[in-house]
Structure formats: structure tokens, C-alpha cells
Image: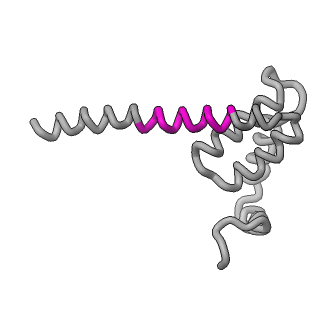
Amino acid sequence: MSDYFERDDARYTKVYKKHTPDILAAFGAFDDAVFAPEGREIPLKYRELMALAVGLTTQCAYCIDFHTEACVKAGASDAEIAEAAWVATAIRAGGGYAHGRLAFKLTEQHRH
């Protein structure tokens, strides 16, 4: 294995198709509805920027790859992608800060 993330990893979708085709179809329909070009309140470009920010936050290389391309296709500028990355960074950092407070609370509980 040369790398964990390789562009042709999608070929393993065949395992889902073989063993859980109904779930795969339901997921595909759900994903298609979420990212439908028309008929949603939030324009596609903004939904793709949100998806990219979530992918950056969860550090999913597949999501980052897919939604970066989708952002570009939806007309997102480099500045918009940069801001989405900073939003993701702020949320991730904020999570560390907030969970740090939880650690202090638990430390206090363990000391008593």
C-alpha cells in the first residue's frame, strides 16, 4: 500500500454494492437531495463551502478532495474557500477550548 488516500479508492464501493445495495442507494438519494443544484433554500455554492469546512474539520481527505472540486464547479472563489477553511479552523479550535473546560470540570470532580 502506497498511501491511505488514493484517487481510485472509490473502486471499493463495489463492496457496498454487493452487501448493502439498499443502504447505498438510500445514502446516494439522500446525498443527491442535500446537494441538489436547485430547490434548496441555501445556494449550492454555500452548501459546498459548508461541506468543505466540515471535511476540513473532520480531516476527511476524501471530503476535502470532493468538496473542493465541487466548490470550484459551484463558482466559489479562492477567497471564499480560504474563509471556509478559517471557519473550520475556528470551530475546531473552539472545540478544543470548550472541551478543555470540560477537562477542568472533570479534574475538579476527580479531586473530590
Q: Which residue is drawn at 24% across and 32% down?
A: 105
Q: What stretch is highlighted in magenta?
A: 83-96
61 or 109: nearer the viewer: 61
Q: Quadrant of the N terminus?
A: bottom right
Residue 26, position in %: x, y? 76, 46
Seen in the picture, residue 24 relative to 88 is either above or below; the reply is: below
Query: Does the magenta-highlighted stretch encompass residue 87?
Result: yes
Q: Which residue is drawn at 79% across and 50% down?
A: 25
What is the chief secondary structure element of the magenta stretch? helix
Which residue is most to the left?
Answer: 112
Residue 86, position in %: x, y? 62, 35
Residue 80, position in %: x, y? 75, 32
Q: Which residue is drawn at 70% across and 41% down?
A: 52
Q: Quadrant of the C terminus?
A: top left
Residue 64, position in %: x, y? 70, 49
Q: Count how many numbered circles sit on residues in the image.
A: 0
